[in-house]
Image: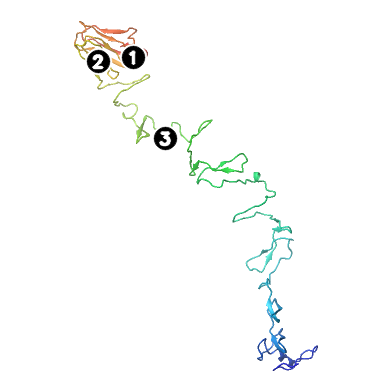
Amino acid sequence: MSFPGFPSPPSPGSPPSPSNHNLLSSTHGDTTSATPLTGDMIISATGNIWERLPVGSELEHLVIVAGIPTWTMQAGSGLGNVTGPGESTDNAIARFSGPSGMVIQDSLVIIDDMGNMSVAGNTLISGDLTVLGDIIGLDLSASGFVVGPASATDSAVALYDGATGELIKDSSLTSNGTSILIPGDVSASGNLHLPATLGDILYATTLDTFGILGVGADDEVLTLVGGIPAWAASAGGGGGGSGTFTGDLTVGGDVLISGDLTVLGLTIQTISSGTAVSYTIGDTYYNAITSATTGILLPPSPVGGQQHVIKDIDGTAGTTAIIVDGNGNTIDGLSSTSLVNNYEATTLIFGPTEWNII
């Protein structure tokens, strides 16, 4: 058999002579002269035409493509060698060792022939975990797993739902991290403990919000500033000094005065003469000056410590007595007392159950 442009090939079974190397001088589809390379082959490409097939690359396989032998990289064969460990665990997942992509190592994650996976250490899941079956060997009540509600109020305080310790629910209590806002009533079976100092006062700062007013200094008085309680120095400058009081003063108990008491501007009720009726002294009148020829009635509902001074200013009581009636309360055990001397005066103070002449 002859090849156009090439010497005849050697007989089957005999090695080619050096002159026969020219049979490898053409590449597939090319009849030009070329130096052959180790591994080149001669193939019949078309009928009796023989052509040179250049040697393939590492890891390529000779396969038939459209009836012609062709060097091809097999699918999955990769472009580089992969080196495994000296030994491995049966059914263990192989892991890359380093960033080269050419070295793998053993692992402790096992997938058996039934598809079950076992992990010796912790499992980190960066996305969602959906479990369609049971989690075998995991005690939810002992491991601290808690199931929350489908939705919740931002900054709300979570409450347990039931007694299992595994369910929590939303609530109307909210917290800013330092305090809790309670929109409803607070019921306490014991004491309500608030951080406070001895003498502090709890007061409403705004609607449904309470604050603590720290205890004031000695001799300060509690006053209002913009409707808010506040401690301030007393109007008289504190204990031991003097002060001025304007208005009515009602005292339900004893009053101890260690110094002088000067009362300015006591209201005086003048009872005119020439009348034929009795006059009732008002609660706010402390003195009554009278020239009346009829009786005087004391206030009907006095309080302890209430005091009145009654005086004859015309000097006619010696002729016509001025009768002072207790108006339902006794005066030194009697229903009334009288002024019978000209310019006479009497002072009466109520307590504890009747008028007393002093």
Query: For the residue carrying disc 1, how many other residues have a C-alpha within 10 Å: few (<14), some (14-19), or many (20+)?
Result: some
* Quarter of the image where one finds residue 76: bottom right
Precedes in sequence: disc 1 or disc 3:
3
- Residue 180: x and y, percent? 49, 40
Kind of residue sitting beneath label 1:
Phe
As drawn, the label of residue 204 is 3
- Residue 353: x and y, percent? 37, 12
Q: Identify which residue is drawn at 56% across, 43% down.
A: 169
Query: For the residue carrying disc 2, how many other residues have a C-alpha within 10 Å: few (<14), some (14-19), or many (20+)?
Result: many
As helix, strand or loop, the secondary structure at mark 1 comes to: strand
The answer to whether residue 195 is left or right of residue 238 is right
Query: For the residue carrying disc 3, how many other residues have a C-alpha within 10 Å: few (<14), some (14-19), or many (20+)?
Result: few
Image height check: is 133 above or below 77? above
- Residue 36: x and y, percent? 69, 88
Q: Nearer the viewer, residue 4 or 260?
A: 4
The answer to whether residue 278 is left or right of residue 76 is left
The answer to whether residue 167 is left or right of residue 108 is left
Kind of residue sitting beneath label 3:
Ala
Asked if labels 1 and 2 touch by Cβ distance under 8 angstroms, the answer is no
Q: Which residue is mark 1?
A: 350
* Quarter of the image where one finds residue 281: top left
As helix, strand or loop, the secondary structure at mark 3 comes to: strand
Q: Which residue is mark 2?
A: 288
Kind of residue sitting beneath label 2:
Ala
Q: Nearer the viewer, residue 220 or 23?
A: 23
